[in-house]
Amino acid sequence: MLFTTNIIFHLRRTVKRWIMDTMSTHPKATKIVATIGPATESETVIEQLIHAGMNVARFNTKHGTPEWHRERILRVKSVASRLDVPIAILIDLQGPEIRIQTPGEQPIEIQENERVTFATTQHTAEKTIIIPQAVIDAEVEGNTLIIDDGLGEFVIVGKNADSLIAEAKNACSIGHRKSLNTPGVVINMPPLVEQDYMHLDAATNDLVEYVGLSFVRNAQDVHNLREELNKRNLMANIVAKIENQSALDHLNEIVLATDVVMIARGDLGVEVAFEELIHWQKTIIKLCLEQAKPVITATQMLKSMVNFPYPSRAEVSDVANAVYDGTDAVMLSEETTIGKYPVKAVAAQAKIVAYNEQFAKPNTIEPPDIDASQWLTHAVSLLLKTSGDPSKSLVIDRVVCFSETGTTAKQLARFRRIRRIDVVTDSQLTYHQLSLVYGIQPWIISLENENLSDTQGVVAQLATHGIAKSGEVVLLIHGSHWKQPNMTNVLKIVSIP
């Protein structure tokens, strides 16, 4: 398609006034991922979470059976359907994460400088923590073991064929099934564990939009999960969780291989030096914006709200800075699974992101390579960089994108120049998946006229479904024909009669 001089002229002159007019009226563009747990599993609380600002419901499969998760996923789906809002479901697999076991599943009290045995089975030693053989094989004397995101730190002082002897660097209480980190050491474990296969077998396309993989080490881990999804005919997108040094070493290939990235700062913050964490957060978000891959910033964002009704000032700063970095979504874990104030935590995050989005600068990053199929979205971004005299601008009230897969919408959203893009699709999967992407308001519509070049017919559909109102000026972005992926090639400015 050729742009006309008039279209370019009007677009450039309307941008500033349009952005100023829309920012104060649009809801938050940054999405919220809330983990469902004992504190939030009822339909009543799920509805409150949605009203407070939840866009994605996360289910941590490290805890609970497939049956438990299925029942609660159905609850979320039921409430979202009743409220007529898109809510994505993310099931988070364990992957090659290491979980310890304690004797009798009871906590172990450990004193500073006390020696503890890490073994594959219950040992004769008084205090034993059970770990996989793969950890013992990979470790050597002098290495560090960290339990429960830094609650307990141990230095290995001895090694046998089936055990490690380690000295505690601090007093701590070690609970059953807490996480174990091995900073600087890659453990030879499969990308999926037996429990993961159980949850994948229970997943269906009408229930799950995203599958998260923990402790991704390289692109092959992502490919392996993709193969398992394909075997089960599951169309869910993959969320690669960046939480160890190996993932950072292979960051570019992982971002290219996955659909979504999660910066899992809990484990990442103990796998790398803590002073490096925010550097990596900004680096990962920048790379994701370049590649148009949605990115989630996660872990301990409002942790004080597990027990208190208000966030700390540092937590407010943390959430706000993730917005300024350009994250697509922010996530809550303990705050909404076991916290005393789960709904208030979501509402607090929504307030923080909505306010600070007004001041966040657009993404100025230009990808190194522009695929031919992306030319239109790059053209729109370039047009939005410059505005003329606002007093002479034609006001664009909304942007509407027609997308079968959501790819065009993600390409547009990554520039962060538009705080709301209405996306029309007739795919239930795309409808819910887009609820994770910055600034996207999805609409599920089966268009009667598949030829989108019939502008009058398209405008009538928008008005009929309440997407655009009479008198509004709308920027339409679509392909010549409906349901033809990677064929977005039309940009129009139309007035709704």
Image (cartoon, rainbow, N blue to C red):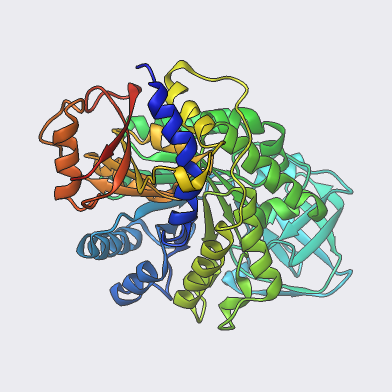
Q: Residue furthest front?
A: 392
On screen, 318 above or below 16? below
On the picture, is 380 further left or further right than 301?
left
Whole-percent x, y for residue 429 in the image:
29, 42
On screen, 108 above or below 23? below
Decide which of 50, 197 is in the foreground and name it. Answer: 50
Decide which of 318, 356 is in the foreground and name it. Answer: 356
Residue at (69% x, 46% y) in the render = 282
Q: Would residue 445 be seen by someone viewing this image from the given angle?
A: no
On the picture, is 147 further left or further right than 357?
right
Decide which of 282, 225 is in the foreground and name it. Answer: 282
Residue at (35% x, 47% y) in the render = 398
Location of the C terminus (image quadrant): top left
On screen, 210 above or below 359? above
Q: Residue furthest left?
A: 448
Whole-percent x, y for residue 488 in the image:
34, 25
Residue at (57% x, 37% y) in the render = 289
On screen, 145 above or below 140? below
On the picture, is 462 further left or further right than 418?
left
Location of the N terminus (image quadrant): top left
Whole-percent x, y for residue 297 in the image:
59, 53
Location of residue 55 by image quarter = bottom left
Q: Would residue 86 be seen by someone viewing this image from the given angle?
A: yes
Numbered marks: total: 0
Whole-percent x, y for residue 239 in the image:
49, 43
On the picture, is 440 further left or further right than 458?
right
